[in-house]
Amino acid sequence: MDKIKKYTVGKPFPTNAVVGKISECTSLPSYINISGENRVLSYEMGKLDKVYGLGEAVRGINKRGWIYESYCSDDPMHTETKRSLYGAHPFIIIDGETLFGLFVDYPDKVTFDIGYSDIDMLTVTVKTADYDLYIIEGDTPLEIVASFRRLIGKSYITPYWAFGFQQSRWSYYTSKDVQSIIDGYRSSDMPIDAVYLDIDYMDSFKDFTVSEERFPDFEEFVRSAKSQHIHLVPIIDAGVKAEDGYTVYTEGRDNGYFCKDKDGNDFYAAVWPGKVCFPDFLNTEAAHWFGMKYKILTDMGIDGFWNDMNEPAIFYSEKQLDKAIDKIAGYKGKNIGIYDYFGLKDTVLGLSNSAEDYGAMYHNADGEIVCHDKVHNLYGFNMTKSASEAFKEIAPDKNILLFSRASYIGMHRYSGIWTGDNQSWWSHIKLNLQMLPSLNMCGFMYTGADLSGFGDNSTEELSLRWLALGIFNPLMRNHSALGTKDQEYFRYKNKDIFRNLLRLRYALIPYLYSEYRKAIENDDMMFKPLAFVYRDDKTAQFVEDQLILGDSIMIAPVYEPNAPGRYVYLPENMLMVRFKSDTEYDCESMTKGHHFIEIPVTDVVIFIRDGQALPIVKAAMHTDDIDLSTMTFITNNNGGEYELVTEEETKTVKYDRTGDICS
Ligand code: GLC
């Protein structure tokens, strides 16, 4: 860790982002200026300097030209004007004449003004000057990423089946609805491994309950789904419904496990079930208590969960609602002009996730009373950590799928993340692509966006194009919001194209899983910007819509409507592979440079790097049936070796020039 320098300012709250100890330095590198109130640093960027990182954030791979906040935010409108999304990932790399990484370990808001207020200046500020600053030097961005990842520890490893395709929607109300989804895929010969249970499986949105009316004999239902090779994955929300007689609430209340208000009474707010309390995940005993509740569902055969609303999302608190209602009542009978009208609107919109509420909520961090707004970014992290740690007690021999919406650096050791409530917008296909490397930089390897988009209505073309990228997302899940148009793939007219793409995913799973595991093992990125790989290629430095995936391939998906294809930049000679399905494909050698590639919606085009090969297997209907003995290679070399990682072992597979396995 010699290339990492740590500076402690003030009295930082321990975040648990970093593993291991690293000693403090006193003198800062000369290029960093920390003068100014709450300023972590200001740095004059060179004209062509690039800034990478920030994990889950809007805009491009190069983050320059905007202002971002590392602050877990429940906001479903991921427009380019937003400053923060659900995850808080305050790590960046500045790539210019001087190359260095910067991690501001601080659990409250960190602001990264990257050429927004002043086109040349990078300025990083915090709310209060209590943080650990890590400066990471290295010869390349990948070297800096590797050092940073060693600093924050190894990423979570998901079960193999979680690389299968997964279908979700908010509004599968009954077990019959869920079964009809399974049947829809199975009867269409479309591979699938999991179906999700959103809040409607619960009894009145109460965590760890199952509606007996809508999901009768749940245990049997889970068993029957398993017999069809389907895992059911229920959602768990952060807020616990405040209802007498509901034991999760009464136990939490009676043991003092919930967050408090300033007077030490339970802090109440409202989310899906109405009035809720928030478990105090910064308290070891409370976190352990909540974590062990997952056993209620694992005992029924459940082996995967998604943790949601854990920024935590607050619709309103009683106090703020009362204030708002009084204010609104004051408008009654008035001739409301523009400013009053804006005031009225803001009063209602401002009720959710308000700074006032976060400032009125307190944790008992094992004896230290701390206001939530000082440690906001640690809530979802610790909710998810509590589940992950409980799984070790509940099912020590089992690998349970877990991913979360809110996150902070360090949570990657316990789970994956999905990127929250995106929309069925073309721009969000590109955003999905651009987030993958930034998330990998921060250790989040098992990740993906809601395919076809969560909010708004998808179309067949958008779903197809998104799926052509989705087959490369480690977490490959189609999910949509209540009230939107159905978007399960078997419902579309051109079922055969969707089937081909889904089958292609399954043919690629051994490669995707191997590259995922190797990236974790080597503190590497599974998805790399071209700029990280082809350091001397000036054009590659600014390519924003293509990625190197693992060691062997480059992907360049289409993300625009009505496009016959797209321009692709090849940073080296590559073998273009045009897949029509898992078994039907043709190859063409391509030279370094710019090419217009025709890509109809029926095709998935990938590029095999010079000297590399891509293993593929015969597609299966679910991951249990993937047969590695059917493996062949599409080669852009004269034969060689591939390190194949499965859940059980790592082995070297030798193949010849034609792609046949020779030992
Ligand atoms: C949140 C989640 C979304 C889920 C919905 C209902 O918006 O991000 O995925 O479907 O809540 O639970």
Image (cartoon, rainbow, N blue to C red):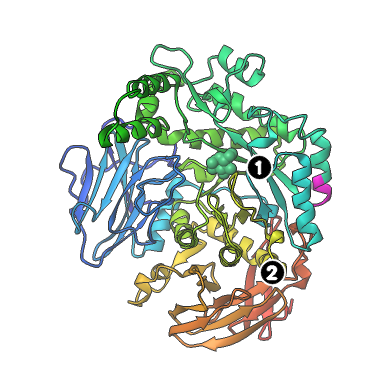
| Residue name at image x 45 percent, y 59 percent | 431
Q: Is residue 226 magenta?
A: yes
Q: Is residue 436 magenta?
A: no
Residue 47 visible to the viewer: yes
Image-quadrant location for residue 49: bottom left
Q: Magenta span: helix, strand or loop, mainly?
A: helix
Q: Is residue 621 left or right of residue 454?
A: right
Q: Is residue 362 above or below residue 499?
A: above
| Residue name at image x 42 percent, y 52 percent | 55
Circle 2 — which element? loop
Circle 1: residue type:
Ser
Total of numbered circles in the picture?
2
Q: Nearer the viewer, residue 489 or 641?
A: 489
Label annotation for residue 381: none
Q: Nearer the viewer, residue 461 or 559?
A: 461
Magenta residues, start to end:
225-229
Which residue is identified by label 2? 494
Label annotation for residue 171: 1
Which residue occupies the extreme left position in the image?
Answer: 35
Q: Nearer the viewer, residue 156 or 222?
A: 222
Whether disc 1's CB lies below 8 Å from ligand 1 is answered no
Provide residue 114's location: percent of width, then percent of height: 26, 54
Circle 2: residue type:
Asn
Q: Is residue 370 left or right of residue 661?
A: left
Q: Nearer the viewer, residue 637 or 264?
A: 264
Image-quadrant location for residue 599: bottom right
Image-quadrant location for residue 651: bottom right
Circle 1 — which element? loop
Q: Is residue 593 left or right of residue 617?
A: left
Residue 638 visible to the viewer: no
Label 1 neighbour load within 10 Å: few <14, some 14-19, many 20+: some
| Residue name at image x 77 percent, y 56 percent | 184
